[in-house]
Image (cartoon, rainbow, N blue to C red):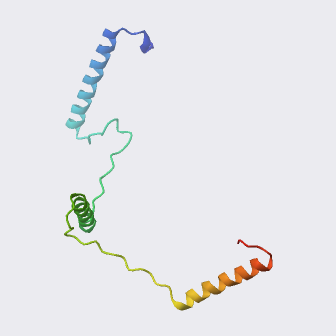
Amino acid sequence: MIAITNLSSKQLLRIASLKGKIETFQQKLNRILGAPAQAGDGATPRKRRRKMSRSARAKIGAAVKARWAKSKGRKSAAKPVKKARRKMSAAARAKIAAAAKARWKKAKAAGKSKL
């Protein structure tokens, strides 16, 4: 086999032209035989696009509108929904405080000023 580096530019152009014709004929043959069209070289199958839900699209649209309104200095028509803050019960807070006091008591008994 001849190395590609030893070929002239005229020969390389001829090879490229023939390769294009071969691919065209292959596609025509596949269409006639009813074979499915291959994407690229057929080594990697095409991935399907994910379909976005209407609610997700609506959220994105509202965020875009709010961002544009903010940059233009106008009040936003769509009000963002604030998440409710999680509240800690009094018992849980007392448990954490007791654990912290015990930790500090142990640290001070060991003569430490930092934990």
The answer to whether 4 appears left or right of 51 in the picture is right
**Quarter of image, res 62:** bottom left
The foreground one among 79 and 36 is 79
Residue drawn 27% across and 66% down? 59
Q: Position of residue 17 (x, y in %)?
A: 27, 18
Please state the horizontal and vertical placement of residue 83, each as a whole percent of the image. 36, 76
Q: What residue is drawn where x is 51% and y is 89%? A: 89
- Expressed as whole percent of the image width and height from the top left, the position of residue 93 reads 56, 86
Q: Image quadrant for the N terminus?
A: top left
Vertical relation: 26 (above or below) 115 = above
Q: Is residue 20 above or below residue 109?
A: above
- Tell which of 95 and 9 is nearer to you: 95
Which residue is located at x 22 percent, y 70 percent? 78
46 left or right of 27 in image: right
Nearer to me, 21 or 67: 67
- Please give the name of the residue rendered at 30% of the width and 74% of the height, measured from the top-left corner: 81
Q: How many callouts does the rendering have?
A: 0
Give how far across and how far down residue 105 sits, in percent.
74, 82
Rendering quarter of residue 63:
bottom left
Q: Is residue 101 left or right of residue 9?
A: right
